[in-house]
């Protein structure tokens, strides 16, 4: 299987170092030296400026149609491996993608600037930026962390959203996410991925807000998620632009210090929610899907066969008809 371009960059870097070239040959502070430039650095990238930041965005379809906003996982990932969702634009929907604050190709910010409320305000600003009429329907489609973010928004603003698709959110309460992570994300010290991360630290340290170095390191370390026999049933690597290490670290710290519960007002939400889970994710089975679905008064659960957590990339042909049927029913 073809390696991700960032993995290839890592292999090239290690080769250069092993042949006695100095690390000074690579200027890690030069934009684009280690990872792609953000929208702040490359103004040719599609973007919007909202809520005090610049977000990498793309849209597909008629802006006057019902809007589907895709929320990617992470925190700190991007929407590149979910571009299959743009097929909904061929079926009467206006599809909006954006890399969340500090993630993907969006503008980077200091670690102490993040909060859940700020991300909710960003999402609200994205909606307002693209909304063309007061009666336009708005749907959220969240994968993994994106499903948690979608739920947090609905919990706070239940009247603003006409429906939601949650693909293996994994924890609408902090205790639930901790349990999911025990099953799916635990990185044993002596695994190959841990050894790779430690090896990389010989060459790159990266202080709290050195975004290029930290994003580069996170890209390399992410390969553990699709290691053979991984719990989440991920078949292999999927494409991405750039990880946002600082936003990941910041939001994890917030959750660990403050916890969260995004279910407190969900009983007020009277729209049907679609919950998707995959056959091969051992950490997110029917019981987990049912637990999350039960937070919503009206819900529908669908299983995606023959795939794992990255179902939108690897099994979109199975996901698409279920999503389209759900949207058309509202």
Image (cartoon, helix red, strand yellow):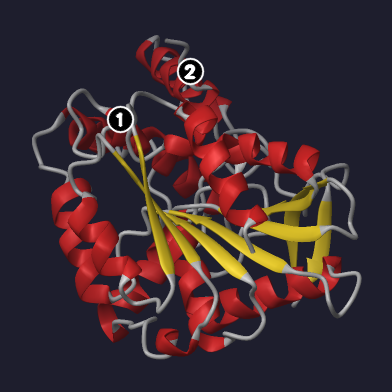
Q: Position of residue 232 (x, y in %)?
A: 25, 39
| Residue 8 circle label | 2
What residue is shown at x 19% (from left), y 32% (from top)?
195
In the displayed structure, does residue 274 sit left or right of residue 128?
A: left
**1 vs 2, front mark:** 1
Residue placed most toward the observer, 152 or 102 = 152
Image quarter in which the N terminus is found: top left
- Residue sitting at the far front: 329
Q: Position of residue 95 (x, y in %)?
A: 74, 51
Image quarter in which the C terminus is found: bottom right
- The residue carrying pointer 2 sits among few (fewer than 14), some (14 to 19) or many (20 or more) residues within 10 Å by Cα, namely few
Q: Position of residue 130 (x, y in %)?
A: 84, 65
| Residue 17 circle label | none
What residue is shown at x 39% (from left), y 81% (from top)?
262
Q: Quadrant of residue 34?
A: top right
In the displayed structure, does residue 91 sit left or right of residue 274?
A: right
Q: Which residue is mark 1?
A: 226
What residue is shown at x 54% (from left), y 83% (from top)?
117
């Amino acid at each position: 299987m073809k390696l991700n371009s960032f993995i290839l960059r890592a292999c090239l870097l290690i080769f250069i170092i092993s042949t006695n070239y100095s690390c000074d040959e690579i200027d890690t502070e030069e934009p684009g030296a280690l990872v792609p430039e953000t929208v702040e650095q490359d103004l040719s990238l599609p973007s919007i400026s909202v809520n005090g930041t610049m977000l990498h965005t793309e849209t597909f379809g008629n802006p006057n149609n019902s809007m589907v906003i895709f929320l990617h996982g992470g925190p700190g990932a991007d929407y590149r491996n979910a571009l299959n969702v743009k097929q909904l634009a061929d079926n009467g929907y206006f599809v909006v993608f954006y890399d969340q604050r500090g993630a993907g190709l969006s503008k980077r910010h200091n670690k102490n600037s993040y909060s859940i409320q700020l991300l909710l305000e960003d999402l609200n600003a994205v909606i307002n930026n693209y909304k063309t009429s007061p009666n336009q329907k708005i749907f959220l489609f969240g994968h993994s962390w994106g499903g948690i973010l979608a739920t947090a928004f609905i919990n706070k603003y239940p009247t603003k959203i006409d429906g939601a698709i949650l693909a293996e959110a994994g924890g609408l309460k902090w205790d639930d996410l901790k349990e999911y992570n025990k099953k799916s994300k635990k990185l044993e010290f002596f695994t190959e991925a841990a050894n790779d991360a430690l090896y990389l630290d010989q060459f790159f340290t990266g202080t709290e807000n050195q975004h290029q170095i930290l994003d580069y390191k996170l890209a390399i370390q992410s390969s553990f998620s699709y290691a053979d026999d991984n719990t989440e049933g991920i078949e292999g690597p999927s494409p991405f632009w750039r990880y946002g290490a600082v936003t990941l670290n910041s939001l994890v710290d917030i959750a660990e210090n403050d916890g969260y519960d995004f279910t407190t007002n969900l009983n007020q939400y009277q729209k049907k929610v679609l919950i998707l889970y995959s056959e091969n994710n051992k950490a997110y089975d029917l019981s987990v899907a049912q637990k999350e679905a039960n937070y919503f008064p009206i819900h529908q659960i669908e299983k995606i066969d023959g795939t794992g957590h990255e179902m939108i990339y690897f099994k979109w042909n199975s996901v698409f008809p279920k999503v389209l049927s759900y949207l058309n029913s509202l």
